[in-house]
Amino acid sequence: MFDKKTSEFLEKLLITPSPTGYESPGQKVWMDYLSNYADKVESDAYGSAIGKLETSHDVMTVMLEAHADEIGMVVQHISDDGFIYINKLGGSDSTIARAKKVYIHSREGRITGITGNTAIHLQDNKNGGGKQPSWKDIFIDIGAESRDEALEMVQVGDPITYTDEVEYLNDEIITARALDNRIGGFAIAQVMKNLKAKRKNLKVNVIALNSVQEEVGGFGARMMSYRHMPDAAIVTDVTHATDSPGIDSREHGQIKLGKGPSVQHGGANHPGVVSLIESAAKKKKIEIQHEATSVRTGTDTDSIFYQKTGIPSALVSVPIRYMHSPVETASIEDIKALIDLMTESVLAMEPDQSFSVL
Ligand SMILES: [Zn+2]
């Protein structure tokens, strides 16, 4: 477990809704916390936020990046009888969307609803019983009797999240909605806290970036890395733990919960940055796991590494089970190890650090 104050920050980040495109509430929480540990905190027009530790004008700048947004749903259509039809925001899974409690984040405040599920007794082929639903089959009941009554509470375009909040299965295992990627925003904030405390050993400038709109295309990271153009980037996101039933390691690799953060190789991951991270892990005896990228990393790393003339980048991930569901599950020890790994990697960087491969 983390200490009480640190756990409170993690839990506050997790329960504050930040569906993709509507991240402001979560970003306010993050910026407020980071203002204790950064020389400067600022945001851009779309709401990506940074905190800076400024060492000197003459030294290299490393960016630590995570994404602030979470997957969710959005109000698409309100029927004459007051039921709300929805669509996904990012990669939400329609096959698990029935019979859930949801919050619609409307101008009137937070509206509670439920995604209807036809009773098993009444199911037939026509109403979708037994079939895997697509998003057009999912509707929310907010207790309204008509479209007009529903419109007093919600409007088309309001974002939606599941109501699930934070639980601990034991001292080690946390489960929550949106661990993807509040863990990342939490981790880079803790790294900044560590770096501020160890400032006399810090030889480079550091930017912690919490980006918007990763789940729909890595857009916030693209805007902010172009704007700040760091000399290197360490990106953190979640990755699939493949140790729950039904996942083929031959296809997806072997990543276990509780066995440390995963360092990714190939593609956007620059071998020089990867090697610096691996040396830091070895030196500080931090257990890490390894995974390969085939085409894309599927994270903000893909948006960062090729900006302008290139930003040497690497991805370190926290394994989670049940990604893009309301019961995402992670190990606290992995999160702690990720924070140590990122902290030590930054402390290992020299003022004139370069990452040429030739
Ligand atoms: Zn993610």
Image: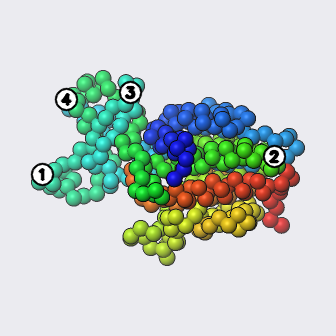
Point 52% across, 72% down: residue: 254
| Relative image position of residue 81 (x, y in whole percent) | 20, 32
Q: In which quarter of the image is the C terminus?
A: bottom right
Distance from the alpha carbon under mark 2 to that under mark 4: 64 Å
Q: In this view, does 200 lie to the left or right of 240?
A: right
| Relative image position of residue 187 (x, y in whole percent) | 60, 49
Please tell me whether mark 2 or mark 3 is closer to you in this view.
2
Q: Can residue 21 be seen in this view?
A: no
| Residue type marked 3 | Gly
Please tell me whether mark 2 or mark 1 is closer to you in this view.
2
Any mark on residue 145, and which?
4
Residue located beneath label 3 in the image: 109
Residue located beneath label 1 in the image: 122
| Residue type marked 1 | Leu
| Relative image position of residue 58 (x, y in whole percent) | 88, 44
Residue located beneath label 2 in the image: 200
Point 55% across, 59% down: residue: 333
| Residue type marked 4 | Glu
Q: In this view, does 17 lie to the left or right of 292?
A: left
Is disc 2 in contact with disc 3, using a CB cutoff of under 8 Å?
no
